[in-house]
Amino acid sequence: MQCKELIIRPATEHDTAVVREIETRAFGRNEEADLVDSLVIATVPTISLLAECDGAPIGHILLTEIKAPLRSLALAPLAVVPEYREMLVGTQLVRAGIAASSAAGFEAIFVLGDPLYYERFGFSVKKAAPFKCKWTGPHFMVMELTVGALAGKKGKLEYPDSF
Ligand SMILES: CC(C)(COP(=O)(O)OP(=O)(O)OC[C@H]1O[C@@H](n2cnc3c(N)ncnc32)[C@H](O)[C@@H]1OP(=O)(O)O)[C@@H](O)C(=O)NCCC(=O)NCCS
């Protein structure tokens, strides 16, 4: 499928149902849709972005603030519906998520995922090693949003209960 126009925009409360459908279709199960639903209604700050191809919703990314030694977000989930994959929609969602996180004053983004996918954006497994949570390991990464923000930082990460 081709898009004449791909738009990435903030998701609003009116998009709850379409976001749920994107997440469910992308992952083939309900867990990620349930996670998004519980996080966006919680008091914790989130950045939720929707990708639309010629007006049709096809992708979604959520970033949620976590408690950390520096002002940080967790990226999860990232979802593109199957028929629009390999068209850089996921890439554009991640890039827009990074830009929105920087603009909101955050210093770092943590993600659990495939380093082959996320390292292209600047996420690093090595830089995440000093930070401890239940996902610390070979698929856990961090990206600093301002140069040097991670220098000397280490410690515990606390995710909202929904995770
Ligand atoms: C992962 C996902 C968001 C990628 O979306 P997309 O729009 O197809 O991705 P892009 O077009 O921007 O990027 C395509 C590249 O990502 C790679 N890629 C896609 N899915 C990948 C995965 N699960 N692991 C590693 N690499 C992956 C492709 O091989 C391709 O690599 P290349 O550029 O070297 O050829 C999409 O496949 C998806 O929704 N998957 C199901 C949900 C999921 O696993 N989400 C990620 C959770 S962290």
Image (spheres, rainbow, N blue to C red):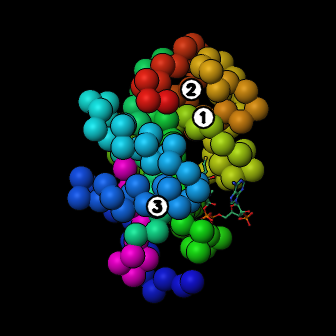
Residue at position x 36%, y 37% from top?
A: 38
* Residue with the mark numbered 2: 150
Q: Amino acid at mark 2?
A: Leu
Q: Amino acid at mark 3?
A: Ile
Quadrant containing the N terminus in the rendered view: bottom right
Q: Is residue 108 visible?
A: no
Q: CA distance from mark 1 to mark 3?
A: 25 Å
Which comes before the other along the chain, label 2 or label 3? 3
Residue at position x 36%, y 43% from top?
A: 37
- Residue 103 lies, in percent from the top left, at 35, 45
Label 1: which secondary element: strand
Which comes before the other along the chain, label 2 or label 1? 1
Which picture quadrant has residue 51? bottom left
Q: CA distance from mark 2 to mark 1?
A: 9 Å
Please say whether residue 13 is one of the residues in the magenta stretch. no
**Are the residues at dot 2 and dot 1 in contact (C-beta closer than 8 Å)?**
yes
* Residue with the mark numbered 3: 22
Q: Quadrant of ligand 1?
A: bottom right
- Label 1 crowding class (10 Å Cα cut-off): few <14, some 14-19, many 20+? many
Mark 2 CB within 8 Å of ligand 1: no
Q: Amino acid at mark 1?
A: Val
- Label 3 crowding class (10 Å Cα cut-off): few <14, some 14-19, many 20+? many
Please say whether residue 49 is one of the residues in the magenta stretch. yes
- The residues colored magenta run 48-56
Is the residue 136 above or below the residue 50 in the image? Answer: above
Q: Is residue 62 visible?
A: yes
Query: Outermost residue toward the front?
Result: 29
| 49 to the left or right of 142 | left
Per the rendering, the mark at residue 114 is none
Per the rendering, the mark at residue 142 is 1
Label 3: which secondary element: helix
**Are the residues at dot 2 and dot 3 in contact (C-beta closer than 8 Å)?**
no
